[in-house]
Image (cartoon, rainbow, N blue to C red):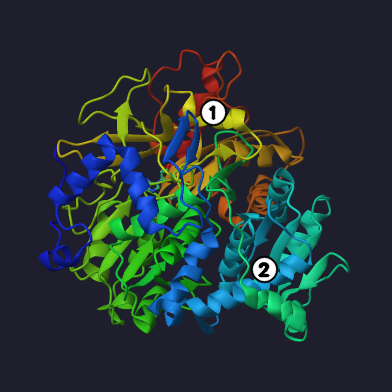
Amino acid sequence: MSDSKTYAPPSEFSSRAHVKSTEEYRALYERAKTNPEAFWGDLAATELTWFRPFLKTLDWDPPSAKWFPGGKINACYNCVDRHLRTERRTKPAIIWEGEPGDSRVLTYEDLYKLINRFATILMRLKSKTGERAVIYMPMIPELAIAVLTCARMGITHSVVFGGFSSEALKTRIQDLGASLVITADGGWRRGKEVRLKDAVDKALEECPSVRTVMVYKRTGSDVNMMTGRDYWWHEHEENLDSTPALKAIAESGEVQHLDPEHPLFVLYTSGTTGKPKGILHTTAGYLLQTAITMKWVFDLREDDIFWCTADIGWVTGHSYIVYGPLTAGATVVMYEGAPDYPAYDRFWQIVEKYRVTIFYTSPTAIRALVRQGDKWPNAHDLSSLRLLGSVGEPINPAAWDWYYRVIGKERCPIVDTWWQTETGAIMIAPMPGAMPLKPGSATLPLPGTIVDIVDTNGNVLGNNQEGFLVIREPWPSMARNVWGDPKRFQEQYWSRFPNSYFTGDAARRDDDGYYWILGRIDDVMNVSGHRLSTMEIESSLVHHPAVAEAAVVAKPHEITGQAVCAFVTLKQGDWNVEALGQELRQWVGREIGPFARPEEIRFTDALPKTRSGKIMRRLLRELVTSHGVTGDITTLEDMSVIQRLASQHQSDED
Ligand code: WTA
């Protein structure tokens, strides 16, 4: 099975690339494999700036990794301060486009000043190293400033995506015991205001750990401010300007010298249980691998304009809007709003306006735009583009082909990047000047990424066999823990196969050694590239007074890849199922966030269960993906249930 057509790197591209040929890639890969400590140690010494050099590369006591012990470092210093000594001082760090069409450009020097001012403000409000801050903001430059200021001060940040509900926000604040919340009055999304501060107020009714709430004025709408707890960012800026002592502190550029393993951030992600996991990333290793992949995968050059369309609330935004590109001294584009607002050409308009050279987005966004036709991109000058990227789920060949032809004009390689919140940085992806592409394959593992495909018993599988993707060796940007739950970290990732990291993904390798990611094998769904847990949505549904039981499965969806389908049994009562279906969808939207709303709710009088009482989601999954149910169903308690569900499905289709 040597799959599909291949696309060799354009020679023009290769000749100027950081890694120019397959041979060069192989040499790097081999060096990293045979002597990982020297490989990563050399990179850490050259790519990062240290206050004190590290003494060795790694202390590895699985699953505990301590990278670069003995050193002192600061992530914000690496992202900002060190560039001021070079020509990058006046180079744009962030080019920002607001949804209503307002825009701002911040140079590295501007960013430095704004961060130091904000650090002074937070210091005055008694925030300090070792605390946790939750950041709940729209995609405005102050979000990046808040993140970097926390990093500068050694405050562990946790960005909660602005699309999450107050309920989801609350559980994250509680889990972290956060003392500080940084937010805004609201943000713009498709012309409507998302009222963030209202959601914060609601969440904080049950979050006694929070002392301080800093509010940035973005939309200018009325919000409630609690004296002694809530502060306007701009008022503190004004106060700083009129207080010479504070101005002097801001100008001193104080920066914390931190341990390489200092907890940089926690990012919550869905797992196999109802409770999201707080994935912990630390400082030096994370920074190194996000920065080096900017060169390896995005082939970053000094004059690039790099645009990753993700939200900073997800790992892609952390690693490829903030930490990776800024450590590497790049110019990033940041956009506040939706890709289809005010029209379907918003992405292409921004590419044209800022002469974007590297564009990184998700297959879902591509599919949604394919559907609107070529006229939208064709109305814009996209000639600045030289490289395209994809992340979040496997990219289907039709979407790949459109991206390649209509957006990249058959000139731009496409880097399909496989990685996870837990891996911190890209792990399997092409080096675009070095290797031929195959649409739908993330191609080859990057240097230092040692992977295998194994069966359920851990036996290594050969080419063309489907199995579980595991990572054999530690890597610098690997997750260090689940916040407050080391047992879960150990069990979830490091127990299934001895001394190996379990990705939760199925994959296959072809005869050229290329990897084809087949998707999750656990109860995690991938809807529009967002990770959702079936359990989390089920527990939200059973929370509703009308619902007795719920089982959630993913069904295939043309645009979003997968969609949420919920099977629900009701408590006794006289329910209007039509209205209830709507209500339940909104209920989940309120409890988790609008992006988690089930596309379909199917009411049934019973759910298929094993004799021991476990819901057989596999059968439900088959029901929504195919038309019948196959395989072993002898453990089913009540066969008639599945038959009823199947015939209901059939008649819906008729
Ligand atoms: C999936 C996003 C195929 C995969 C960076 C993984 C992909 C999960 C790809 C992580 C890709 C991500 N091809 N599948 N290029 N990229 N995935 O944590 O199932 O939000 O385990 O991180 O997305 O999602 P997460």
On screen, residue 628 above or below 122: above
Amino acid type, mark 2:
Ala
Q: Position of residue 74 (x, y in %)?
A: 54, 58
506 vs 217, nearest the viewer = 217
75 vs 304, nearest the viewer = 75
User: Which residue carries the number 1 mark?
Assistant: 490
Label 2, label 1: how many angstroms apart (C-alpha)?
35 Å
Q: Where is residue 404 in the image (x, y as percent from the top left)?
A: 23, 64
On screen, residue 543 above or below 187: above
Report if residue 193 is visible in the image: no
Is disc 2 surrounded by few (<14), some (14 to 19) or many (20+) residues within 10 Å? many
Q: Which residue is drawn at 79% across and 66% down?
A: 125
Question: Which one is earlier in the sequence, the residue at label 2 or at label 1?
Answer: 2
Determine the secondary structure under disc 1.
helix
Considering the image in quadrants, where does the N terminus appear?
top left
Name the side, left or right, on which 427 lies relative to 136.
Answer: left
User: Which residue carries the number 2 mark?
Assistant: 119
Q: Position of residue 270 (x, y in %)?
A: 56, 42
